[in-house]
Image (cartoon, rainbow, N blue to C red):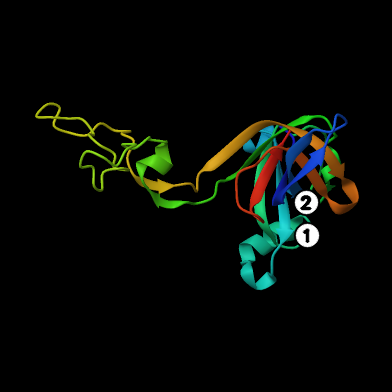
Amino acid sequence: MSGLIGRKIGMTSLFDENGKNIPCTVIEAGPCVVTQVRTEEVDGYNALQLGFDDKKAKSSNKALDGHFKKAGTSAKKKVVEFQEFDGEYKLGDSITVELFTEGEFVDVSGISKGKGFQGVVKRHGFAGVGQATHGQHNRLRAPGSIGAASYPARVFKGMRMAGRMGGDKVKVQNLRVLKVVADKNLIVVKGAVPGHKNSYVTIEK
């Protein structure tokens, strides 16, 4: 599946031909450098490894420096493999946002915003008690019973309880490409994508 590595710039909105206001996300996509070519004969599968966003030489080690030197490029902050990439590319090639065309649909993956430790109302959408009457005091947002008596005498796995929320890998599918700005390496997709501003995302066709 063909794709690029990008950075989430932020959200804005555009008006379509009917005057409807469409929320959209701006992503800086590429240019990405081909840092390794996986082949069926050597690796057992076909894939392209792409690198995005230069990093300082002092932040890299000799193993990585040698890896990127083969591709004739500087050390990269983000490296992602895309299997079954359409088209023929060789080591050191640069792939730009022109890979995408306006009107097509893409899938965007990223790490969702971390929310920290949250209760069941925010984390799982529990309703809470709803009313503060009848002696509820501090039970408005409590999880309530979690089941189990003398049998089975344990809490079942997967019970929805309070805990850390966010920070998960999330893929949003079928986002329409509204605009491609090739000279600035920008792609504008309809709707929201996971992650905070300036976080890395992968865009797949």
Query: Going by the image, does 87 lie left or right of 199?
Result: right
Query: Going by the image, does 142 lie left or right of 148?
Result: right
Residue 5 placement (x, y as % from top left): 71, 47
Q: Which mark is residue 56?
A: none
Q: Which mark is residue 33?
A: 2
Task: Relative to 148, say whether 143 is above or below.
Answer: below
Task: Relative to 183, say whether 144 is above or below.
Answer: above
Residue 100 placement (x, y as % from top left): 82, 37
Q: From this viewpoint, is residue 44 visible?
A: no
Residue 159 placement (x, y as % from top left): 31, 34
Residue under numbered circle 1: 73
> Identity of the amino acid at label 2?
Val
Q: Nearer the viewer, residue 107 or 80?
A: 107
Task: Relative to 181, say whether 40 is above or below.
Answer: above
- In the rendered image, the quadrant that contains the N terminus is top right
Residue drawn 88% across the image and 47% down it: 182
At label 2, counting other C-alpha atoms closer than 10 Å, the crowd grade (few under 14, some 14-19, many 20 or more) is: many
